[in-house]
Image (cartoon, grey):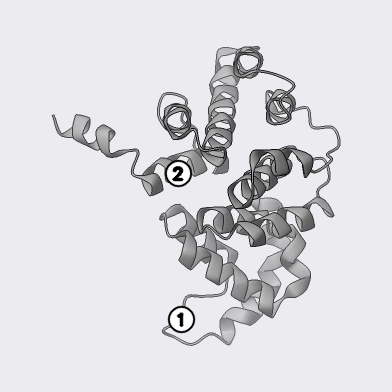
Amino acid sequence: MQSIASVFVCLSLAFATLQSGSHANEPPLSLDAAVDLFFAAQPQESSRLFDAIVLAQPQLEPSLWQRGLALYYADRFADGQRQFELHRTVNPNDIENPAWHFACVARAKSLQAAQQAMLPVGRDLRVPLTEVLAFYKNSLDEQAVLAAADRGTQAAQRNQRCYAHLYLGLYYEATGAIDRAREHMLLAATKYSMTHFMGQVAQMHVKLRGWDEPLKKDALK
C-alpha cells in the first residue's frame, strides 16, 4: 500500500484540531494512534478510532487505506470492501488495494463473488504484485508468484518473498484454507520478515490469530 507518510502530511493539521477537542480519557483522534492500536493487535479499537476520524473529517476517508486493513481484521468486511473501493478513487494503480478488497468480499460472501468483484487497477511495477493479482484471479499458480519473488538481488528477494507470502496467506485465509494461510503468513512474519508497514502487518496477523504460539514456546526452550 502507499506509504503511511504520504497521507500523514495532509492529515496532520486536521488531526491537530481534532486532538485539541478530545477528552482527556479518550484516545487522540490521530492516524498514529489508530495505527498503534492496529499493530497492538486491537483491530476493533483501531477501526473505531478510524471511524471517529472519518466522522470528524469525512473528506479524508478515501485516503485511509490503513482503515481498510483494520476493518478486515475487525471482521467488518462490508465496511472494508467499501473502504478499498473508495481508496481506488485516489490511488488507482495500487495492486494491494484489490487484494484486500478481494479478501473482504471473499470473507463476506464467497470466492466466486470476490473474483467477480475484483477491482480494476493500473500499472504497479512492484514485484511480485502483478503475479499476486493474477493468482487472485486464478490465472497464475502459487509457484509462479514465488518464482517472481525470487528474481533480483538477495535483498530484493527477501522483501519480495515477504510480500508474496503475505498475500498468499491472505488469499488462503480469505478462502478458508487456514493451514496454508498459517504456513505462508508465518514465513512472511519470520523467515522473510521486514520492518516496513506491510511486513509489520504479517507479524500482527500471526499474533492476532495466535499462530505465533509455537514460536513463543520455541523461544522459551
Answer with left or right where residue 161 lies relative to residue 114.
left
Answer with left or right where residue 78 lies relative to residue 89.
left
Q: Nearer the viewer, mark 1 or mark 2?
A: 2
Q: Which mark is residue 205?
A: 2
Residue designated by label 1: 26
Position of the N terminus, as image quadrant, is top right
User: Which residue is found at the position 69% from the left and 55% from the top?
Assistant: 81
Q: What residue type is labelled 1?
A: Glu
Answer with left or right where residue 125 lies relative to residue 21.
right
* Position in image of residue 158 (x %, y %): 53, 21
User: Which residue is found at the position 39% from the left and 49% from the top?
Assistant: 208
77 or 98: nearer the viewer: 77
Residue 19: quadrant of the picture? bottom right
User: Which residue is found at the position 68% from the left and 72% from the top?
Assistant: 54
- Secondary structure at badge 2 equals helix
Q: In this view, does 164 lie above or below 84?
A: above
49 or 159: nearer the viewer: 49
Q: Which amino acid does label 2 sit on?
A: His
Residue 93: quadrant of the picture? top right
